Amino acid sequence: MRRNTLTTAVLAGLTGLAGMASVSHAVNVNPDGLGQVLLYPYYTARGGNDTLISIVNTTERGKAVKIRFIEAMNSREVLDFNIYMSPYDVWTAAVTEAADGRGKMLTNDTTCTVPYIFEFENSEQEFLTFELNDGGPTDPERTASGYIEVIEMGTMVPVPASAPPATDDSIIPWVTKHVAGVPRDCDIPVLAWTQGSGLPWIGGDTDFGFDTTLGASGGLYGSASIINVAEGTMISYNATALDGFWEPGTTRHTEPDSLLPDLAAGNETRSFVFDNGRLQENTWSAGIFAVNATLTLDRLMNEYVTDDELGARTEWVLTFPTKRFHTDAEGGYVLPNEPIEPFTRTWHIRADNTLHLPCEDMEYRFWDREETEPAPELGPPTVSPTPPPGVAPVFDLCKEANVVRFGSATPDYTEVLKEPLRTGGFAKLGYVNFDLPYEDGWVRFDLSDNVGPGPDRRLSVPATSGTDGRLFVEGMPVIGFQATTFTNGELAGGVLSNYGGTFTHRGTRSFVRSN
């Protein structure tokens, strides 16, 4: 077959009647790791852990991005600000523990931020507790673990070769451009957001300095490493990259103290994902559902190792980055007991002032490495009351960023990520423990069938004209990874021989029709 004919056939197979232009303008998880939105499923500053993060701008244009640090329980913001990256720039920072147990961010990176944290005392900013007013724990240590969002707000106009006038919108990319490793003048973007400065952003012209024809154009990628110096371990992961979050030409540049844009702010309402090799393209009533569709799995699976002879420890992170928009009644997103699909419960304070948690009950199955599964009549150990014979074991996840530990004991803190075990009224906001009969194997979580009250977890696609029945996307929007460490003590000469690694979760997708 001639090459041009083969190319035409491949494109036709990928896009069908939708057309290539349509597909390229839809929310998707970019398999190459570049995007307009970066989601980091977990940070921790607990138990000697520090989390190092980086954001890379791979394009020849400057970028304005919103970075947001979000605590793990109910996705309350603990810190957010604006970053103004020059072409081909990298911004780095670390999350570590403050004196009172809260998390704090520090950076020695000179890239312009507003406010300019590099010039703060010790170049650091403690995480804030003002938003922890939802009935959950209010202790500052609640901020010590969570996840991170990075959302591109716009692409700057080209950098001029020489200094433009202050009234020229190319002044912004010119002053943020690095020269000999340092931006020319990070005071300018700070002043542009300062009352009384007379500069344009605070005056309402937030598009000043941005290419509003190009809009937010993507090309960002990110990564994180969780390092424990005392234990000699490091585990790393890549951020999940969403592309097509904004419609072409969109610029959404907001003040540094704004909670917008967030994951519900995207104006692209189409999504596409590959389901068993077939492209699923759907149109939704709002951008948040398009984001959900790209992240939704009906089954999630990964491995674990708990071999004591190897000093092996395994923990999983499961983060639901859009959950708050569906469950947080105290944040005003929903009404109490009226969650938005696919979630089935809400976070709200009851009339008696007790906290109702948005826990999701799920079934799971597990096998050892030789395909062995416990016989139903034996009943495997479970994290909930033991089910009757023949009934699948059940567990629940109640937080936005959950840590699942594998092991027989229930220590006060998990060994790898140092997530705490909680008691009393907040017991379900600690880590989840899986005590399984095999020291290594793999586990599969069922994210679609709801074994608790309410309907199964599924998103209904509003536009299904010309088809029989309504289309549903089954499951929950989730990101995360498996973290495993091995501890062999010290080698000759006192050298630590500890190791660690991470593996992204695998999963399946399910699109079904129902009347």
Image: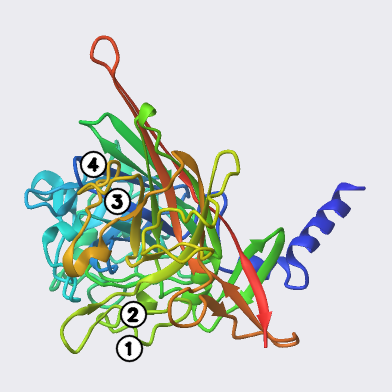
Number of numbered tags placed on the structure image = 4
Judged by depth in the image, the label closer to the viewer, 1 or 3, is: 1
Quarter of the C terminus within the rendering: bottom right
Q: Residue 283: horizontal and vertical position, in percent?
A: 60, 79
Q: Residue 77: horizontal and vertical position, in percent?
A: 24, 66
Q: Is residue 125 visible?
A: yes
Give the secondary structure at mark 3: strand
Disc nearer the start of the sequence (1/3):
3
Disc nearer the start of the sequence (3/2):
3
**Where is residue 274, by image quadrant?**
bottom right
Which residue position holds label 3? Answer: 43
Task: Report whether 33 appears left or right of 64.
Answer: right
Kindly identify the amino acid type of the residue bearing the numbered disc 1.
Leu
Disc nearer the start of the sequence (3/4):
3
Q: Residue 58: horizontal and vertical position, in percent?
A: 47, 47
Which residue position holds label 4? Answer: 49
Kindly identify the amino acid type of the residue bearing the numbered disc 2.
Thr
Q: Residues under labels 1 and 3: Cα distance?
A: 30 Å
Which residue position holds label 1? Answer: 335
Marks 1 and 2 close (CB-CB < 8 Å) = yes
Kindly identify the amino acid type of the residue bearing the numbered disc 3.
Tyr
In the image, is residue 307 above or below residue 380? Answer: above
Judged by depth in the image, the label closer to the viewer, 1 or 2, is: 2
Disc nearer the start of the sequence (1/2):
1
Q: Nearer the viewer, residue 191 or 302?
A: 302
Q: Residue 435: horizontal and vertical position, in percent?
A: 38, 49
Residue at horizontal 23 percent and vertical 64 percent from the top: 427
Disc nearer the start of the sequence (2/4):
4
